[in-house]
Image (spheres, coloured by chain):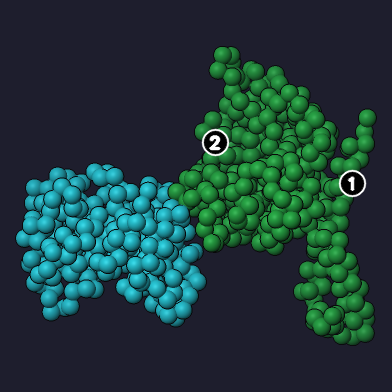
Chain colours: A green, B cyan
Amino acid sequence: MITTPENKNKRSSINSNNPMPKYIRRSILALSIDDPILEKKSFDSWADAIILDFSKKSHCNWQQDILSRMPSAIAIAAKGDAEIFIRINNDFAISELEATVFPGIAGIILKGAHSAADIQRVSSALDSLELSRGILANSIEIDIEVNNAACTWNLLEIARSSARVGIFLLNEQELCANLGIQTQASLPFDPLEYIKSELITVATSIGGQAVGMSYPLSLATDSIDAETLRKGILRARDTGFKGAVCPHPDWINLCNSGFRPSEEEANYYVKVIEVFAEGIKRGMASVPIDGKMIDVPVDLRAKVYLEWAKRAKARDTEKYQAHQKP
Amino acid sequence: MKKILHHRRSWMIVPAHDPKLADTIAQYKPDVVVLDLEYSVAPKYKEQARANLVKTVSTIATDDIEIFVRIDKASRWADVDAAMHRGLTGIIFCGVDEESEITEIDALINTKEKERGIDPGHIELVIILESAKGFWNLSEILQASPRLSAVGVGRIDLTMQLGPVPQHEFRLFRYLMTRTLVAGKMHGKQLLGAMWRPDSRGGVANQESTKLAAQQAKLMGYTGCICATPEQVNPMNLGFLS
């Protein structure tokens, strides 16, 4: 099997065992391959990941049309070092995969899946496409866009249906519409609180992660003032989401800085690790810092979160270097 | 489905043996009348309530009123037998735990439809969930019969079974409502329930809090609810108004 240098799934750059989170995908931006300034939008966005959407032209063979344009669109969108994903509609998955899967994509976002069988069907198609198009076997992820009741109900079976399953993206607007929940954020509580809890738990249980936003920003479709967005991202992060699909480019910078431990938190973890290590040397099982007890699990958590902060910083460096290229 | 389900906002419970039930229906005008053979009928009146059903249904049935009978799980065979007459829209079955209970009641309804000249498949089945087991088996239960048209959440029984102190916040409630919503929507059923508050729920809720509970449930994707008292009919209709 040929391994192409264009395969840019960021799993390969992670060297620690079972890193948490598995991927650094804090900001995800959807763009159309029909966009005349796709290159500028993707490059200027600084998004960790870009989802490429496409429309099917009715007056010509849409598959041939997409086939001819998708490879260059992938290359153009990746210039800022974003991971590239293609959004596939479950109802037309096989024909859409044939038209869109090329070297250079990290995965596909499967929208509208209902059951594990849907994922298995897509996974089989990807097996063949990887073989025929010179892509490393089993390298293309299947990420699940959760937007309907059946997908929500069958989440665990879907998550376990293929080793390709990576992240779950909650499309809150469409899921609310499907469930008959008001899409205006007018409830005093998050109507999807329990669905989000389940989504995050299931995704984590298979070693993946969930992407979403806290209520009511999760129903926002446009720009939000920075302070409100910063608080919403912090809440989403602390709920367990590891990134968000950004409805507006303004969100990206704040998502990149918010879906990770802050500098202040990272400094605190360094202190925790140092003080605990010193305590162990002195024969202690726990040590106090600022009135808090630090023991083994707290030390372990600090190490995991510090690693997360370092990986996020490394990802920023990768993107910065890509942006310096002529 | 014979009717437009979202018009079934208020499901008013009246004891099936109540001699004034026709007056109550005329006064409060619920979307759905639920003739009760369960909690609101004392054991000594059960036989009388069953015996009256054929006459009651034929008396109150009009084009504008849909009539359901809420059966008692413990005596469901006798209750279904007593309820199945022309004019009846459906059966409400509370406390379902598993698929086989639906299959069994569906077969009984089939038989009674044939015996009593009711169009095959005409009688609907509505379930109210009252147990952890029922919640866990929900998807299978909802697929067990094509006559199953709506699913609801029975708050009081759930509170008792799952353990929270009834007069305090029932913290599991929103989770249970959400889980029911997902399964119900997945299988295309009407959702029955309201976002009751701990100090104002079911039979003790006043009109204002009933309306609020219905409004919040509507925003959550629910479209109707059982009314424990006739006074809840109007606020329920207003709260679930499209």
Can residue A65 be seen in the rendering of this structure? yes
Q: Residue at x 8, y 66 (%)?
A: B52
Locate the C terminus of chain A and report the quarter of the image it occupies.
top right
x, y percent for residue A157: 54, 51
What secondary structure is found at the residue carrying circle 1? helix
For residue A317, which numbered disc appears in the image? 1
Residue A258, quarter of the rendered image: bottom right
Q: How far from the left and from the top, in percent, is residue A14? A: 82, 51
**B234 on left or right of B162:** left
- Is residue B52 toward the left or the right of residue B7 in the image? left
Tell me the crowding category of disc 2: few under 14, some 14 to 19, or many 20 or more residues within 10 angstroms, Cα based. Answer: some
Q: What residue type is labelled 2?
A: Asn
Report the number of numbered marks. 2
Q: In this view, does A24 lie to the left or right of A196?
A: right
> Which residue carries the number 2 mark?
A90
Please state the chain letter of the residue tagged with numbered disc 1 in the rendered image: A
Q: Chain under label 2?
A: A
- For the residue labelled by badge 2, is the local secondary structure a helix, a strand or a loop? helix
To which quarter of the image does residue B211 belong?
bottom left
What residue is at 55 percent from the left and 17 percent from the top?
Answer: A58
Q: Could you tell me if residue A207 is visible in this image?
A: no
Q: Which residue type does callout 1 highlight?
A: Thr
Pick whichever of labels 2 and 1 is earlier in the sequence: 2
Percent across and percent down for residue B239 are 37, 57
